[in-house]
Image (spheres, grey):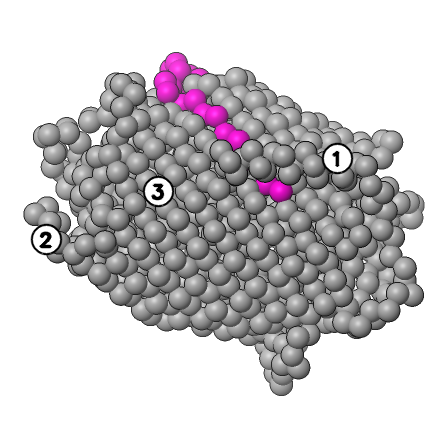
Amino acid sequence: MILLGAGARCALALLFVLVSVNTDLRADEKEHRENSGFLIVRVVDIETKEPLPWTSILILELNRFGSAHEDGTLHFHNLPPGSYTLKTFRLGYESAIRKFSINARDTLRITLNLRSTPLTTETVVVHGEQDDAEGVVRPIEVIAGKRLQQQLGRTLAETLSKEAGLSQRTMGPAPARPVLRGLGGDRLLILEDGGRTGDISATAPDHAVVIDPLTADRVEIIRGPTSLRYGSNALAGTINVVRGQIPSSLSEHLHGGASLQGESVNGGIAGGGTLSGAIGPFSLRMDGSGRRGSDLRTPKGHLRNTFYRNFTGSIGGSLIQEWGYTGIAIGRYTSRYGIPGGFVGAHPNGVRIELERSHVQWKGEMYNPFLWTRRIESEFAFTDYHHKEFESTGSLGIEFGVLTYSGEIIAHLPAWGVFERGLFGFSGEYRDFASGGFSFSPRTKEWNLAAYLYEEVDFHDLSIQGAVRFDTRKVTPNEERESRRIGLIKRRTFSDFSGSVGAVYSAGRNVFLGATVMRSFRAPSIEELYSEGPHLAAYSFEVGNPTLETEQGLGLELYVRYAAEYARGQITFFHYDLFRYIFPRNTGRINFRTLLPVYQFEGMSARMDGVEMTTEVHLSNTFVIGGTLGSVRGTLKETDTPLPMMPPLQAKLDVRYTSTNLTAGIAARMGARQDRVDQFEEPTAGYALLDAVAQYQISSGGFFHTLILNIENITNAEYRMHLSRVKSIMPEPGRNFKLLYKLFF
């Protein structure tokens, strides 16, 4: 509470200063710049030459992001010398991609001409030195702009659930977590501004992710060798939510935004805002949001005890200089939510969970510090996470506390021989984990150290990237002891390499062929090693296994992409071999003291095979038809039986109308029957749903307004999602009207 009170006072002080002080910092183009350059980007309509205000512009390699002003311009201060790629996002216009190079002391002006089109190409960003028609060697799927606004849900998982290959694991609306290509939990790393969140959402289905997407600038899905920068276990990819809590550049104007969202299916309402500006060489930013909802309404009645109350906020500032920047941010997240009852062993009225996270983060960047580096990034973060689970009587069931300290330093390398661009880095993390109540997991300390190297090579029609990473993790319980239930609890050390190579070949006539090979490594978590007791909110009695070894994965991905002016599409085939795949297996036994089913953590070899498809076709000047498909099949090799909790084949087909200010569309979402299930797992029937969306936006008087109406499950169909833990008592939500208003200035 002290941190929250201090944060609120700082936020009010910052708001007063930003409003009171003239933040117009238009740069003097003759200013002496020893180490950096200055970029002015102007965005105009290709036919009318009129400026396009509020266009979002991203410098891919530096992760610099901003919105054009009323005159269509955006200034980027203090750019380190080098070659970069610009990407634009704007409703009703094609995304423009432009390569550029800048030197120290340069002032560079670039005009981007955008063509009006309904084709929504902003979802796939090509991270590389090629333009959009030349390669996808470093693909990062970006959900931003109108795409993010139209899909905005209560949680990150719901926001991403309509993307190809993505589904959500749920136990009600609040604790939903994304699942990518059938891999979830600790196998899917979720980041905020490139850093760890410090929560325990990966360890159990009742634990929530401490990120609200309401104030996010964009969401990135990172795949291939690039993802190894963030962790050793990135077989399917990594999800990064970008909020920009620590500013990395100066803004010549005061910027901000506000959001208000409501929905009918649970009486939910959410609101939030951001504000950023500069005072001299200091760049400042703050954001905050709140969200609340009552019990979900389904076609069969209300799903009891699915309320939620969330609050998040942060305040950050940076000193921006020609040599780089240094900045700090503090943040706070609190949540209260319910987990429904009705299962064997669950309380009749479910469980209530309260959690809070306090977060402090420092970042810095230095340009050209040495001859052998282009720039150096460094980061340090501290997270204090506290989690309580209350029974229906109000008594405390389980309590968790985690203190996390992490740091990272990255050197970006210049071109050398055939190597176009690269980096190497070191990272470290220390976690102090403790539990109480009816949890019998011992207090445990974890140390993790990692080193990694990444490089890119370009041979004109063939582009290659590669990465290698080494991790070592030490897990130390407070005391070593013999447990009657799980065996000897002792210190464990896990070390191994992970690596990946990706390549793309331009086959001509807008066709590209790509392949990625990856070896991943994952150490067992504290819960997988040492759990021994009831977990009421997860409806399970969990038994750890202190003898578990590391989980290793081998992955192969092959894809064909077609990218023409009026049609785009991609089909991807993937195969994963997982050695000692760790998962909680239902033993079929009941712990009669708690009446909970017993889950034992095991390590067994598994394989996963799947396919993903995306396509968009320009039918006319204003209409687009698009679709996605994702399917994955998981099998335990030793027994040739299905892996538990695998999502069924899912598909989406939509038709959209787009003009300069208006977008409207209708979409069909479909899921196949999932009857390929584990021994103690329930099958689910197939379903087909109908959704509609309409978005209108307008710029007026220095403000940009957007209004979005979503109607989900128009027919109020009754259906059940296979990855829902509550599907046996209630179906998914019924018809839902969602209204979102966003204001930018």
- Estimate how packed mark 3 is, as few (under 14), some (14 to 19) or many (20 or more) residues with alpha carbons within 10 Å: many
- Estimate how packed mark 2 is, as few (under 14), some (14 to 19) or many (20 or more) residues with alpha carbons within 10 Å: few
Estimate the x, y position of residue 394 in percent, counting from the top left: 30, 21
134 left or right of 253 in image = left
Tell me, for residue 16, which label it has, or none: 1
Q: Amino acid at mark 2?
A: Glu
Report the front residue among 154 and 324.
324
Q: Name the residue that disc number 2 marks.
A: 482
Report the front residue among 609 and 270.
270
Please, what secondary structure does the residue beneath circle 2 have? Answer: strand
Estimate the x, y position of residue 432 in percent, counting from the top left: 34, 51
Residue 635 visible in the snapshot? no
Q: Give me the C-alpha separation between circle 2 and circle 1.
A: 59 Å
Q: Residue furthest left?
A: 484
Q: Give me the C-alpha separation between circle 3 and circle 2.
A: 24 Å
Residue 610 visible in the snapshot? yes
547 left or right of 376 in image = left
Q: Which callout, 2 or 1, points at the residue further toward the start of the chain?
A: 1
Estimate the x, y position of residue 283 in percent, counting from the top left: 72, 50
Q: Nearer the viewer, mark 2 or mark 1?
A: 1
Q: Quadrant of the C terminus?
A: top right
The reply to whether callout 3 and callout 1 are in contact (CB within 8 Å) is no
**Image quarter for residue 434?**
top left
Please, what secondary structure does the residue beneath circle 1 have? Answer: helix
Q: Residue at x 84, y 58 (%)?
A: 40
* Main secondary structure along the magenta-highlighted residues: strand
Q: Residue at x 62, y 42 (%)?
A: 315
Segment tinted magenta in the rendering: 297-315
Q: Name the residue that disc number 3 marks.
A: 401
Please, what secondary structure does the residue beneath circle 3 have? Answer: strand
